[in-house]
Image (spheres, rainbow, N blue to C red):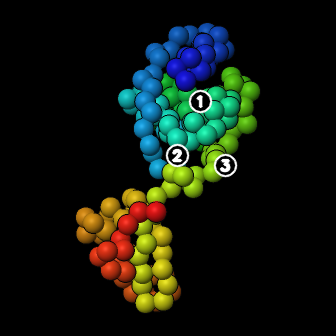
């Protein structure tokens, strides 16, 4: 993966005729995100399980996608995440279609937690579940009841 990231930087340096500081590369689970660019840290993170299941697509699409975010930050400063500057880099430098999201199967990586209201059951994301543990409250849009764990023993991740 490091080679793919650095190759993208070599392409960008040839295109823009300037050098760019290479980013730190990490592999951490990040929900359903295949990759994430941390602009001010000059770091890219890749989801290790999604990478393992989609190696070719990572190399051809995800790596240029995240590198384009870092390059747009260096070249243009604060811009829309998938705005015209980012799209231009994707097309011109990497000859990639500038898609904002991936289409990977995320069933293996998407954890959900079951909560109920007075009329239905909901699968909440890890983020919302953690927010509830910290005191946040979510209401059902239909019945307006607060979402709650069905019972203490059944509040588990899927």
Quadrant in the picture for residue 155: bottom left
Q: CA distance from mark 2 to mark 3?
A: 11 Å
Q: What mark, if any, has residue 103 been given in the picture? A: 3
Residues 153 and 146: in front is 153
Q: Are marks 3 and 1 in contact (CB under 8 Å)?
A: no
Q: Is residue 30 left or right of residue 101?
A: left
Q: Is residue 105 left or right of residue 69?
A: right
**Sooner in the amino-acid sequence: mark 1 or mark 2:** 2
Crowdedness near tag 1: few (<14), some (14–19) or many (≥20) residues, C-alpha within 10 Å: many
Residues 145 and 21: in front is 145
Crowdedness near tag 3: few (<14), some (14–19) or many (≥20) residues, C-alpha within 10 Å: few
Q: What mark, if any, has residue 33 been given in the picture? A: 2
The spot of residue 148 in percent (x, y) is 35, 79
Residue at x 39% of width, y 31% of height: 40
Give the SS element for disc 2: loop
Give the SS element for disc 3: loop
- Quadrant of the rendering where the N terminus is positioned: top right
* In this view, 97 is above or below 71: below
Q: Is residue 70 left or right of residue 134?
A: right
Give the SS element for disc 1: helix
The spot of residue 69 in percent (x, y) is 54, 33
The spot of residue 31 in percent (x, y) is 47, 50
* In this view, 20 is above or below 46: above
Residue at x 48% of width, y 80% of height: 121
Q: Is residue 57 left or right of residue 34?
A: right
Q: Would you say residue 88 is visible in this rendering?
A: no
Q: CA distance from mark 3 to mark 1?
A: 15 Å
Q: Label 1 belongs to which residue?
A: 63
The spot of residue 136 in percent (x, y) is 30, 69
**Sooner in the amino-acid sequence: mark 2 or mark 3:** 2
Residue at x 43% of width, y 72% of height: 114
């Amino acid at each position: 993966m490091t080679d793919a990231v650095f190759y993208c930087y070599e392409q960008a340096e040839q295109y823009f005729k300037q050098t760019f500081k290479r980013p730190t590369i990490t592999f951490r689970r990040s929900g359903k995100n295949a990759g994430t660019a941390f602009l001010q840290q000059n770091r890219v993170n890749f989801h290790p399980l999604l990478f393992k299941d989609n190696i070719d697509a990572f190399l051809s699409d995800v790596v240029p996608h995240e590198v384009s975010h870092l390059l747009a930050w260096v070249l243009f400063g604060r811009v829309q995440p998938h705005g015209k500057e980012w799209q231009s880099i994707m097309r011109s430098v990497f000859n990639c279609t500038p898609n904002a999201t991936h289409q990977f199967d995320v069933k293996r990586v998407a954890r959900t937690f079951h909560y109920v209201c007075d009329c239905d059951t909901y699968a909440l994301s890890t983020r919302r579940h953690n927010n509830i543990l910290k005191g946040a409250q979510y209401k059902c849009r239909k019945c307006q009841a607060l979402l709650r764990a069905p019972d203490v023993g059944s509040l588990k991740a899927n």
